[in-house]
Image: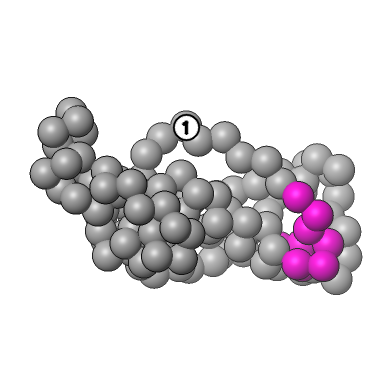
Amino acid sequence: MTVRQRGSINSTTAPNVEDMGPTTVIEGLTPQDFVRYAGASGDFNPIHYDERYAKALGNPGVFGQGMLTAGCAGQFLANWFGLANLGEFRTRFTARVWPGDINHRWRSHWRG
């Protein structure tokens, strides 16, 4: 997994309403990334690492944990605002993350 960030990050000043944040791109996700995250999070649902199990349930293969994506989004926000300024954030899972996904992007608006 490769993480690239484009755009400026300035956590020393508060953003203005509707400021656009930097773009973060996650590339080259592998099933091994899902296994590593399972070890870190304790989410050992085999749908995330057992190809046969995932396919038996009607999926094209294994896919990433939603909280893996949320963790990457949290890192994006911490980089933009500074960890000390981030009290909480909310997320909604709208799509699965598959091995080999590229250009998985977060681009955020500050809404005050």
Residue on which the image places disc 1: 94
Q: Is residue 65 above or below residue 22?
A: above
Determine which quarter of the picture holds residue 10: bottom right
Determine which quarter of the picture holds residue 71: bottom right
Quarter holding the C terminus is: top right
Examine the structure image and report whether residue 82 is included in the region drawn in magenta: yes
What colour scheme does the image use? one colour
Left or right, residue 67 beside residue 57: right
Quarter holding the N terminus is: bottom left
Examine the structure image and report whether residue 87 is included in the region drawn in magenta: yes
Left or right, residue 42 beside residue 106: left
Across and down, in percent, residue 84 comes to 82, 67
In this rendered view, identify the residue nearer to me: 30 or 104: 30
The residue at the point 50 percent across, 35 percent down is 93
Q: Is residue 58 above or below residue 60?
A: above
| Secondary structure of residue under mark 1 | loop
Left or right, residue 19 beside residue 98: right
Q: Is residue 14 visible?
A: yes
The residue furthest top is 58
Magenta stretch: give its range: 80-88
